[in-house]
Amino acid sequence: YLGPELDTISFSMTLSAFLGVGPWREITKLRKMARKGHVHRLVIGGKVYGSHKWVIEKCSIEMRRFDGQGRLMEAEAKLTLKEYPKR
């Protein structure tokens, strides 16, 4: 027995200037975490999800809304995370 398999989780997030979020800034952070394999706790609604940290396995961005000057106002980030156990 090698133990339980690592968990994965997939979800979408709306990144919207109308909700007080800078979409470009958050997209940049997500891409950096994905490319560098940064490991973080997953916090949803102020509560830590899972017993281990997580790494971004897949990240895709859909740019949805722009203002009259062409600035990104809203985007959707689709993420797949994989559990990263302590070693």
Image: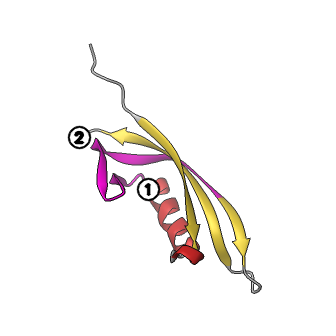
Q: Residue at x 36, y 57 (%)?
A: 45
Residue nearest the viewer, comparing 49 with 79? 49
Where does residue 7 sit, x and y in percent of width and height? Answer: 39, 33
Q: Is residue 30 above or below residue 42?
A: below
Q: Which residue is mark 2?
A: 86
The label shown at residue 36 is 1
Q: Tell me the quadrant of the picture where the N terminus can be found.
A: top left
Instruction: Specify whether 41 is left or right of 86.
Output: right
Near mark 2 (Cα within 10 A), the count class, few <14, some 14-19 or many ≥20, is: few
Residue 56 counted in the magenta span: yes
Where does residue 74 sit, x and y in percent of width and height? Answer: 64, 70
Q: Tell me the quadrant of the picture where the C terminus can be found.
A: top left
Query: Looking at the picture, which amino acid does disc 2 mark?
Result: Lys
Alpha-carbon distance for marks 2 and 1? 18 Å
Q: Residue at x 44, y 36 (%)?
A: 8
Residue nearest the viewer, comparing 33 with 79? 79
Query: Looking at the picture, which amino acid does disc 1 mark?
Result: Lys
The residue range painted magenta reads 37-61
**Residue 69 figure quarter:** bottom right
Where does residue 24 sit, x and y in percent of width and height? Answer: 58, 73
Q: Secondary structure at mark 2?
A: loop
